[in-house]
Image: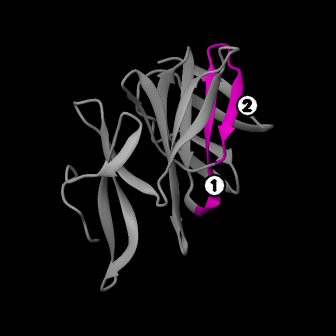
């Protein structure tokens, strides 16, 4: 595994994982207001790496690190997952905190100058969690419905395929926890 030194908005962060699809639990950066937001999602793409961070109410971000060490900060949203599906790259964003419950699915593709660019495909209206890629090149995830059974949150299962989100029963079960 090769390691690179990186610079983000004049804040140093180190030990960016350059190989593999899982982030090291030891990689930390300074991002937003939280001094130790962990790198949680890494996907090799577009001759570089997409790096996703989720610090909850303290913020997050999506960064593209090119092979030359150049950094492009693509988003300040909390990144809940980065997946390659159907030869396309999708980013799941979201925040569920106090009375905020929002999320979206973004698609990352190359722009006319061959740089990664993103566009929002779907407003989820709730933060996704437990995002899982399936063998059929789709993904399932759960969203907090905003409802409770007693003091436990109620979640719904969703499926993302061909750029569309639909209800699903493919999660372990529509959960209450």
| Quadrant assignment for the C terminus | bottom left
First in sequence: mark 1 or mark 2? 2
Say how many tags the image has. Answer: 2
Q: Which mark is residue 59?
A: 1
In x, y percent, where is residue 89? 47, 28
Is 150 situated left or right of 53 in this image? left
In x, y percent, where is residue 72? 70, 29
The quadrant holding residue 51 is top right
In x, y percent, where is residue 33? 70, 57
In x, y percent, where is residue 169? 20, 54
**In this view, 26 is above or below 129:** above
User: Where does the magenta region start and end?
Assistant: 57-76
Is 41 situated left or right of 75 in this image? left
**In this view, 146 is above or below 1:** below
Q: Which residue is mark 2?
A: 7
* Secondary structure state at the residue bearing disc 2: strand
Label 1 neighbourhood size at 10 Å, few (<14), some (14-19), many (20+)?
some
Name the residue at 46% across, 21% down: 19
Q: Which mark is residue 151?
A: none
User: Residue 126, can we see it?
Assistant: yes
Is 165 situated left or right of 72 in this image? left
| Of residues 161 and 98, the one drawn nearer to the viewer in this rendering | 161
């Amino acid at each position: 595994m090769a390691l690179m030194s990186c610079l983000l908005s004049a804040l140093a962060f180190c030990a960016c994982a350059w190989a593999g699809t899982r982030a090291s639990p030891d990689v930390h950066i300074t991002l937003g207001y939280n001094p130790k937001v962990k790198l949680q999602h890494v996907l090799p793409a577009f001759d570089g790496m997409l790096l996703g961070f989720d610090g909850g109410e303290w913020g997050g971000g999506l960064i593209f690190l090119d092979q030359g060490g150049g950094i492009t900060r693509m988003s300040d949203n909390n990144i809940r997952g980065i997946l390659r599906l159907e030869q396309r790259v999708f980013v799941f964003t979201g925040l569920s905190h106090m009375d905020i419950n929002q999320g979206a699915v973004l698609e990352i593709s190359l722009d006319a100058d061959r740089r990664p660019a993103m566009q929002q495909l779907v407003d989820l209206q709730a933060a996704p969690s437990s995002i899982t890629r399936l063998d059929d090149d789709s993904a399932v995830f759960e969203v907090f419905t905003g409802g409770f059974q007693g003091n436990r949150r109620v979640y719904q299962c969703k499926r993302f395929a061909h750029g569309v989100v639909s209800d699903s029963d493919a999660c372990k079960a529509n959960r209450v926890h």
